[in-house]
Image: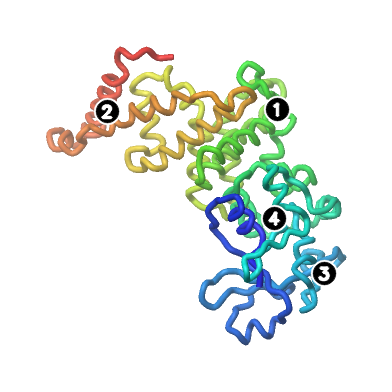
Amino acid sequence: MYLVGGAVRDERLGLPVKERDWCIVGATPEELVNEGYRQVGKDFPVFLHPETNEEYALARTERKTAAGYHGFEFDTSPDVTIEEDLSRRDFTINALALDDNNELIDPFNGQQDLDKRLIRHVSEAFVDLMRQIVANGEADALVPDRVWKETEAALAGPNPQLFFEALRSCGALRVVYPEVDAHFGVPQPFKWHPEIDTGMHTMMVVEQSAYLSDDIEVRFAALVHDLGKGTTRLAELPSHPGHEQRGKKLINAMADRLPLPRACRDLGLLVAEYHTHCHRAFELRDDTVVKLFEKVDAFRRSERFEQFLVACEADARGRTGFEHRDYPQAAHLREAFVAASSVDAGSIAADTDDRKIPQAIRSARVSAVRDVRKGRQLP
């Protein structure tokens, strides 16, 4: 029995392991069922442990066919070795295993690549196989649950942008995430985006989000914050007027197609619509700042407001030459939010006519924000 894949990779990197996958060599499906494992796959055996509920898969090899599970034929016989199982994986840093004695199985020098922070495919055959799958139209039939599960795992990893770059390199991104693929080749104003290409910017933002936060919601928001730019009319390029609202529609369409967690969808929608407000924090009027807090539901969901600010910072830093720049807008809005939150809404409500309570509370919050901003030297 071997611990395999991302769990081994993250453990070697000193990162928290959130999910463990196991590979069993030398066993049959019948033996596992007799031991209490629950089988969840028919075409290739995957089992859930009777106590931990973790996934255990029989070691297997695979080859492309015209039939079988998504066009593959699997060999799960007991004589398949762990090295053969690892050989079918995508990147060398994922083709790692630990045996029962915690000894590393590393047939493709994945540890060396981890040390060098290098991403390599296990073999060029994997790349060719992925391109063949896309060309044959088989990627179109991917189950939405599986697409999101793999995306979620990638977003939780140390370099989530590599997942989307790998999908694009074999043509699969335009199939599973056409809204993201549409970014590439779309220009932006050089003044604000020295990298120019919107797709490149999006990958940089996802990368920055991984530096700033472990939250999948933040990283997903980074991915979708500029979706609307992929639908800008040619006559308006390189500007992107109205991309915020167009982006919201695309995120909702994505949520209809895939089983996105509500927290990911909601934060993505907020960042798509209001990230430019955050970037212009120093230019906003006091009442507009309070309206922003209300729009993102900050008074009830302060933790999500913090996620919003982090995603906006990732957007600001995800530009060529801006990677290490400070983002004072976030600190400014945090300070203003603390001031607005200090208003005693209960006392105001007790002393105000019911019809005037919302406006009275808002006015008090605007005054608090004005006081904390008054006299400050804004950039």
Q: Secondary structure at mark 3?
A: strand
Residue 325: x %, y % from top left: 53, 24
Which label lies toward us, 4 or 1? 4
Residue receiving disc 4: 94
Disc 4, disc 1: CB below 8 Å?
no
Q: Secondary structure at mark 1?
A: loop
Q: Earlier in the sequence, mark 2 or mark 3?
A: 3
* Callout 2 crowding tier (Cα within 10 Å): few <14, some 14–19, many ≥20: many
Q: Is residue 19 visible?
A: yes
Residue receiving disc 1: 197
What is the distance, in whole Å, between disc 2 and disc 3 at their CAs? Answer: 64 Å
Measuring 63% from the left and 33% from the top, which residue is drawn there? 204
* Callout 4 crowding tier (Cα within 10 Å): few <14, some 14–19, many ≥20: many
Q: Residue furthest left?
A: 351
Measuring 62% from the left and 22% from the top, which residue is drawn there? 321
**Of 33 and 277, which appears nearest the observer?**
33
Residue receiving disc 2: 365
Is 6 displayed left or right of 142 in the figure? left
Is 354 displayed left or right of 280 in the figure? left
Residue receiving disc 3: 73
Identify which amino acid the numbered label 1 is placed on: Asp
